[in-house]
Image (cartoon, helix red, strand yellow):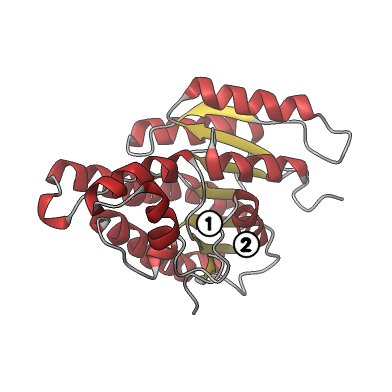
Amino acid sequence: MSRFQGRVAIVTGAASGIGKEIALRFAAEGGIPVIADLNLDAADKTAAEIKALGTSKGGSGDAFAVAMNVVDEAQVEKGVADTMAKYGRIDVLVSNAGIQIVKPLVDFPFADWKKLLAIHLDGAFLTTKACLKHMYKAKYGRVIYMGSVHSKEASKLKAPYVTAKHGLIGLSKVLAKEGAEYNVSSNVVCPGFVRTPLVDKQIPEQAKELGISEADVIKNVMLKDTIDGQFTATDEVADAVLFYAAARTTVHSGQSAVVSHGWFMQ
């Protein structure tokens, strides 16, 4: 039997990038991903792609798209309620939705600071809170937050992002302690730079702010501390997420995994 047979996972920001890779991999191993995304059209396309893969290779052949702005409590609650109405369970939450804004701290607009923290931290809180009531009742849940090397480390130009990603570590540790009696675990996966649209957007922005070429941003900023000069791949991040999602017990709860080609070692 596939390790996620019959399991249902809500994955936020799953219409593209890392979230989509996680959803595809979860479905390939028998699980049913709920594609929760701000862009419902894109979420529908990802769900259709998963359904088109069918069940011939052990996949679930099933997925469900919901519109979800993770900072809108009513929309989060509706997405969770619609999932429960359709499947009657939520086994896994992957809180992955995020954005990036790069500026020097001295120039950072307060509105942008609040926007970024809201998506990363408020979104993680709201989706967790909405799912927990169902996980606690079922005495089972696996919650994985998408952190970053910036949950452990800092870089210039990313004050709110680094602050938010550090905050996810704290949230995860609290949930690990509160959720243990309900067999709910909590973990953070911390990737290095992954070549997604989110990272591609940063390259020219950082080049402009730092006064260097885009090639130098990649080589001397993003990848300079890796052991092999490689970006982290989406499937490498998914490996870590699915490891925690498949955990048989809470033995790893409260921990974080860095997936960065050696950029940060702990």
Q: Is residue 7 left or right of residue 118?
A: right
Q: Give x and y (percent) for residue 91.
A: 62, 49
Q: Please state which of residues 9 and 53 is positioned toward the viewer in this rendering.
A: 53
Task: Give the left or right position of residue 103, taking residue 214 as reference.
Answer: left
Q: Which residue is mark 1?
A: 144
> Can you name the residue that lies furthest to the top here?
41
Q: As shown in the figure, which amino acid type bears the numbered disc 1?
A: Ile
Q: Are marks 2 and 1 in contact (CB under 8 Å)?
A: yes
In the image, 233 versus 129, the foreground residue is 233
Q: Residue at x 73, y 26 (%)?
A: 51
Query: Dot 2, crowdedness within 10 Å: few (<14), some or many (≥20)?
Result: many
Which label number is shown at residue 244? 2
Specify the label residue 265 is tagged with. Answer: none
x, y percentage for residue 179? Answer: 50, 64
Residue at point 53% right, 49% down? 94
Question: In the rendered image of this protein, does residue 209 appear above or below residue 40?
Answer: below
Q: Residue at x 38, y 54 (%)?
A: 217
Tell me the distance, in whole angstroms, between the alpha carbons under discs 2 and 1.
Answer: 7 Å
Depth check: 141 or 40 in front?
40
Residue 101: quadrant of the picture: top left
Asked whether the viewer can see residue 117, the reply is: yes
Image position, residue 156 (x, y; %): 26, 61
Residue 45 falls in image quadrant: top right
Q: Position of residue 35 (x, y in %)?
A: 56, 34
Q: Earlier in the sequence, mark 2 or mark 1?
A: 1
In the shown orientation, is residue 93 left or right of residue 211? right
Secondary structure, mark 1, is strand
Asked which secondary structure carries label 2, the reply is helix
